[in-house]
Image (spheres, grey):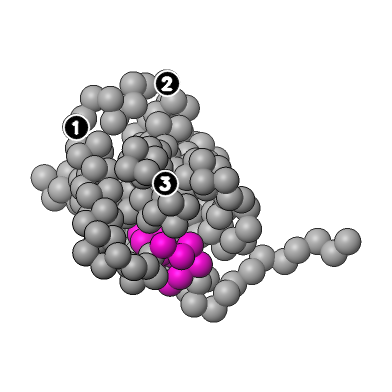
Amino acid sequence: MLEGLLFESFVAMGTIAFAMSGAFKAIRHEFDVLGLLVLGFSTALGGGLIRDALLHRTPAAFIDDGPAVYALIGCAITMLSHRLSRKHVFGLTDPNSRAFLFLDAIGLAAFTVMGASAGAASGLNAFGIVMLAALTGVGGGMIRDVLAGETPLVLKEDFYATATIIGAIIFFAMYRLSLAMTTVTAATFMITLLLRLLAIQYRWQLPKPKL
C-alpha cells in the first residue's frame, strides 16, 4: 500500500515537473499552444516511452491515464502562471535559471527511481538497471531540447546524467541488500535530487580531455 502510494507520488512529481520544464521552454521559444503541449508532453512522457520500448512492453502512458493527466496538469499550471504574470514566470522561461533547473532536477530524480524500479522488477542486472534509470531520467529532456532546437542539457551539463547513474547504482546496491522498496526508492530519489542540486549550486564539472 505504502510502496504503491510512494511510487505514484514519484510518477506525479516527475511527470508534472518535466511537463512544466518543457512547457516553459516552449514559452521561451514563443511556441503556440499546440507546440507548448507537444513539448510538455514529450518531456514528461518521453523517458517512460523509451523505458517501456526497451522492456518490450506497451508504454504505461498508453494504458494508465495518470501520466497523461499529470502532463496536462503541468502544462496547465505553466499556461496559467504565464497568463497571470505576462512576464518570465519566476525565471522559469530561462533554461539557465535556478527555478527551471530545480524543476528539471525533480523530474530527473523521480524518473531515475521509476526507471530503476522498472529494471529491477524486470529482473535486469546491475548494468541494465543503471542504463534504464539513466535513459528514463534524461530521455524526456533530450527530446525536449532537440524539439526546441537546442543542444540537449545532458550533453553540456557534465553532472546531469552522472547524478542519475550514481542514484541508480545506489538503488541497485540497496535493492541487492533486500531493503524495503519504500526505503530504496525514497533514498534514491533524495540522493539523486541532492546530487543534481549540489551540482547546480557549485557548478560541478567532470574532467574534460585536453586537446
Q: Give the residue displayed 85% in from the left and 64% down from the top.
A: 210
Can the viewer see residue 37 in this picture? Answer: yes
Residue that appears at 56% across and 55% down: 153
Residue 114 position within the rendered picture, expressed as x and y whole percent measured from the top left: 34, 44
Could you say which quadrant of the image residue 50 lies in? top left
On screen, residue 112 versus residue 149, left or right, reads: left
Give the mark nearer the N terminus: 1 vs 3: 3
Q: Is residue 96 magenta?
A: yes
First-in-chain label (1 vs 2): 2
Q: Residue 74, labelled with which disc?
A: none
Instruction: Measuring from the top left, give residue 5's x and y in whole percent.
Output: 15, 48
* The C terminus: image quadrant: bottom right
What amino acid does circle 3 point to? Answer: Phe
Which residue is painted at 36% across and 61% down in the image? 103
> Which label number is shown at residue 31?
3
Question: Which amino acid does the dot numbered 2 rest on?
Answer: His
Contact (Cβ within 8 Å) of mark 1 with mark 2 = no
**Where in the figure is residue 108, as x and y percent of width and height?**
41, 54
- Label 1 vs label 2: CA separation? 20 Å
Mark 1 belongs to which amino acid? Asp
Q: Quadrant of the N terminus?
A: top left
Residue beneath disc 2:
56
**Nearer to us in this view, 120 or 102:** 102
Bounds of the magenta segment: 93-108
* Most common secondary structure along the magenta stretch: helix
Asked which secondary structure carries label 3, the reply is loop
How far from the left and from the top, in percent, is residue 38?
Answer: 38, 38
Q: Secondary structure at mark 1?
A: loop
